[in-house]
Image (cartoon, helix red, strand yellow):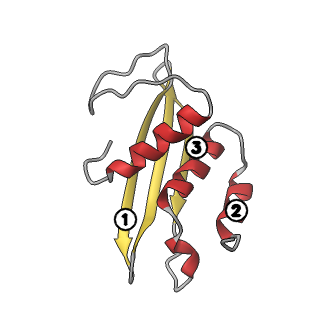
């Protein structure tokens, strides 16, 4: 975990893992990877543009010492109000893509969908 990443990012990952039936443990930053388990490394950066929003994020999965998955999110750098959506929802969509539950195109469409 990057120390600049807000704690809500990890909470959103944990929420997704629990909701989808995955057992997991949280280990300290810089801990050795357990090669027989999937390890996730993540980074999230928030920015300010009239409100705080998740502007950039990455989640990378490793197994057996090899990178086996990677997903990233970049908020539009425009006046598009869609960038102000809930950060945890964006993390959940990222996890859906990383674990093959959504394509990146499907996640992108969900992010563009108007709020109900």
Question: Image check: 85 left or right of 109?
Answer: left
Residue 99 occupies quadrant: top right
- Badge 1: residue crowd in 10 Å (few <14, some 14–19, many ≥20): some
Q: Nearer the viewer, residue 25 or 70?
A: 25
Q: Earlier in the sequence, mark 2 or mark 1?
A: 1
Percent coordinates x, y for residue 89 in the rendering: 56, 56
Q: Is residue 81 above or below residue 26?
A: below
Q: Nearer the viewer, residue 91 or 19?
A: 19
Q: Secondary structure at mark 2?
A: helix
Point 49% across, 18% down: residue: 37
Point 47% across, 46% down: residue: 12
Q: Is residue 60 above or below residue 90?
A: above
Percent coordinates x, y for residue 66 in the rendering: 50, 26
Q: Secondary structure at mark 3?
A: helix
Farthest residue to the bottom: give it.
Answer: 79
Question: Image check: 110 left or right of 24?
Answer: right
Q: CA distance from mark 3 to mark 2?
A: 14 Å
Q: Which residue is mark 3?
A: 95
Q: Which residue is mark 1?
A: 46
Question: Image check: 27 left or right of 64?
Answer: left
Residue 41 occupies quadrant: top left
- Badge 2: residue crowd in 10 Å (few <14, some 14–19, many ≥20): few
Q: Is the C terminus in the top left, top right, bottom left or bottom right quadrant? A: bottom right
Point 70% across, 39% down: residue: 100
Q: Which residue is mark 2?
A: 110
Q: Earlier in the sequence, mark 1 or mark 3?
A: 1
Q: CA distance from mark 2 to mark 1?
A: 20 Å
Point 51% across, 63% down: residue: 86
Q: CA distance from mark 1 to mark 3?
A: 18 Å
Residue 49 occupies quadrant: bottom left
Percent coordinates x, y for residue 50 in the rendering: 38, 83
């Amino acid at each position: 975990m990057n120390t600049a990443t807000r704690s809500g990012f990890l909470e959103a990952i944990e929420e997704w893992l629990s909701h989808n039936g995955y057992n997991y443990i949280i280990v300290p930053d810089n801990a050795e990877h357990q090669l027989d388990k999937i390890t996730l490394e993540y980074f999230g950066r928030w920015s300010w543009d009239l409100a705080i929003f998740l502007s950039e994020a990455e989640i990378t999965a490793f197994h057996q010492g090899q990178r086996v998955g990677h997903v990233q999110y970049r908020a539009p750098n425009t006046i598009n109000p869609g960038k102000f959506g809930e950060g945890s929802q964006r993390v959940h969509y990222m996890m859906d893509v990383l674990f093959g539950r959504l394509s990146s195109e499907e996640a992108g469409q969900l992010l563009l969908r108007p709020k109900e």
